[in-house]
Image (tube, helix red, strand yellow):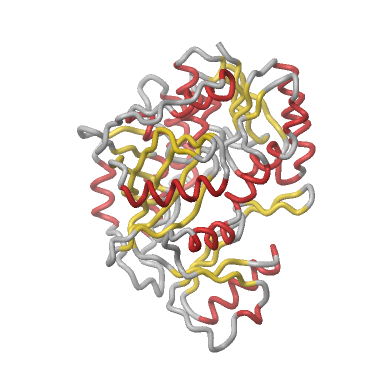
Amino acid sequence: MARVLVLDGHCSAALAFVRSLGRAGHSVAVGAVAGCFAPAALSRYCAVTVEYPPPTKGACAFVECVSDLCRRFSFDLVVPLTDATMWPLSNHTGKFLGTAVVAVSDPDSVQRASDKYRVTSCARELGVPVPDTKLIESVHDLTPDLACEFPLVLKDRFSVRWVGDKGVAGSVAYAYSKRDLLEKAKLRLDAVGDVLLQQFIEGGGVGFSCFALNGDVYIPFQWQRIREKDPRGSGSSARKSLEVEPAVFEYSQKLIKWTGIQGLSMVEFKKHRRSGRFVLMEVNGRPWGSLQLPIHCGLDYPAFLLRWYLEHCAPPKQIDYADGITCRWFAADLQHLENLWQGRPPGWPFKYPSFWSSAIKIAIPWYPGLRYDDLSLLDPRPGLAGVGRWVRSHVMGGS
């Protein structure tokens, strides 16, 4: 059995990895930034917990620390799960020669997939529908005669912007007027030098995932978002598996081939509410937050990733999986309700979920086809700790 170090223990994908590989009998260690709440480290399948310095505070120090951990614990495989850990490791895989395999693609592929403006431009050339997108590099680009329909989305070009050895976390904001746009754009320009101005697409979120090898797509999977932590648009708190639709497969395959990503990859779309067409949101050349859903449906992506990197065994081209399975992260559903309780944002022109309707749905603990990301009878501590932490911080006023 392999010795695996799963990084980014704070994220939901880490818990999915730990449970999958731990159940298979592998020895799994969880790594996280010192002082960070890491649910995956509370899992019964976590054999060892290790800490490392924040990658965005010093990429080289982070890489040195992980390399030292691999020598000390004799890890066979290192699995980074976020842009903050993946980018530094992809640029320094040479430091792990003779010790551990790092589950990352080459730096050029990682860079292509993480550059949202470049992805959008390429998608347009490939015939993939995209929102109207403009790269703003100065407040002078926001001319008074700028034609736009509010709200507009302001998003950073990168989830993490690397400047030398340091990283700056990206953000997403919404502008409801030209004055609001100018103020929010200036904040990001001062912080990172540019910002993407993007048309808001009204519609439901749709995800596509696969195992990518040499430009080809293996074990594809599709889902739709049911609830999002931020109802305006964010990571999902609940989602449901679907059969893969031909247009989603075609668009995703084109983009994944262009990025050159190897291993787990995800493409996010919105299904336009009026036209029904799929519009690209972004590409993630790494594991994604709702990874537990395909595992519940019969696609054990973490197991396939381990076999590829350690045994060079390619996954099957396709596996039939269960559609109509709903998976929810209960603590994130509580965040969804909190956002709804605050009411519809001023200036929001689109349909907004009802608090009480969502509360009733969330209050139902089980029905046929319902599964959980966090809560588990066989591994209760991560889910209960996450819910308890939310209650302490939002209801009791604690930390």
Q: Position of residue 40 (x, y in %)?
A: 52, 29
Which quarter of the figure is the N terminus placed in?
top right
Is 267 on the left or on the right of 323, as rendered? right
Task: Give the residue drawn at x 36%, y 66%.
Answer: 344
Question: Across the whole image, how many numbered discs are drawn on residues?
Answer: 0
Residue placed farthest to the left in the image? 368
Residue 340, visible in the rendered structure: no
Foreground: 359 or 69? Answer: 69
Is 23 on the left or on the right of 399, as rendered? left
Foreground: 26 or 268? Answer: 268
Q: Quadrant of residue 6?
A: top right
Is 377 on the left or on the right of 85, as rendered? left
Task: Give the residue drawn at x 48%, y 58%.
Answer: 126
Task: Give the residue drawn at x 39%, y 39%.
Answer: 329
Foreground: 329 or 288? Answer: 288
Q: Position of residue 206 (x, y in %)?
A: 36, 50
Which quarter of the figure is the C terminus placed in?
top right
Task: Give the residue drawn at x 37%, y 38%.
Answer: 221
Residue 307, relative to residue 87: is it above or below? above
Residue placed farthest to the bottom in the image? 145
Foreground: 228 or 103? Answer: 103
Q: Position of residue 338 (x, y in %)?
A: 39, 53
Residue 82, visible in the rendered structure: yes
Q: Position of residue 194 (x, y in %)?
A: 66, 67
Residue 333, relative to residue 300: is it above or below? below
